[in-house]
């Protein structure tokens, strides 16, 4: 089972290590247009390769 912990605020390093030791990915300090948005996106793609964003789902339906 895959888990991603996402926080708008920074998570202390000790807590990150503990969560990551339990197979949980951590993305913190999430801000609009921030670098961690890219990290979250790549983490989702890595853990859930069959995930499709709502935008691509809408495009797929339009093509039918």
Image (cartoon, rainbow, N blue to C red):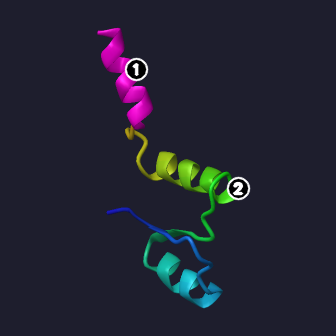
**Vertical placement of residue 46 versus 18, above or below:** above
Q: What element carries label 1?
A: helix
- In percent of width and height, residue 24 lies at 45, 71
> Residue reaching furthest right?
35
Q: Which mark is residue 36?
A: none
- In percent of width and height, residue 8 lies at 56, 70
Q: Which of 55 and 44 is in front in this view?
A: 55
User: What is the magenta segment's predominant secondary structure?
Assistant: helix
Q: Earlier in the sequence, mark 2 or mark 1?
A: 2
Side of 45 where 58 appears, left or right: left
Taking the spot 36% from the left edge, 19% from the top edge, the residue there is: 60
The residues tagged by marks 2 and 1 sit, at their Cα atoms, a distance apart of 26 Å
Taking the spot 44% from the left edge, 72% from the top edge, the residue there is: 23
- Quadrant position of the C terminus in the picture: top left
* Residue 56, quarter of the rendered image: top left
- Quadrant position of the N terminus in the picture: bottom left
Q: Nearer the viewer, residue 62 or 50?
A: 62
Q: Which mark is residue 59?
A: 1
Mark 1, residues whose alpha carbon is within 10 Å: few (<14), some, or many (≥20)?
few
């Amino acid at each position: 089972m895959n888990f991603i912990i996402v926080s708008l605020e920074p998570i202390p390093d000790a807590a990150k290590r503990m969560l990551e030791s339990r197979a949980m990915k951590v993305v913190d300090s999430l801000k609009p247009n921030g670098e961690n948005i890219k990290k979250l996106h790549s983490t989702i793609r890595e853990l859930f390769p069959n995930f499709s964003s709502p935008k691509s789902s809408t495009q797929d339906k339009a093509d039918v």
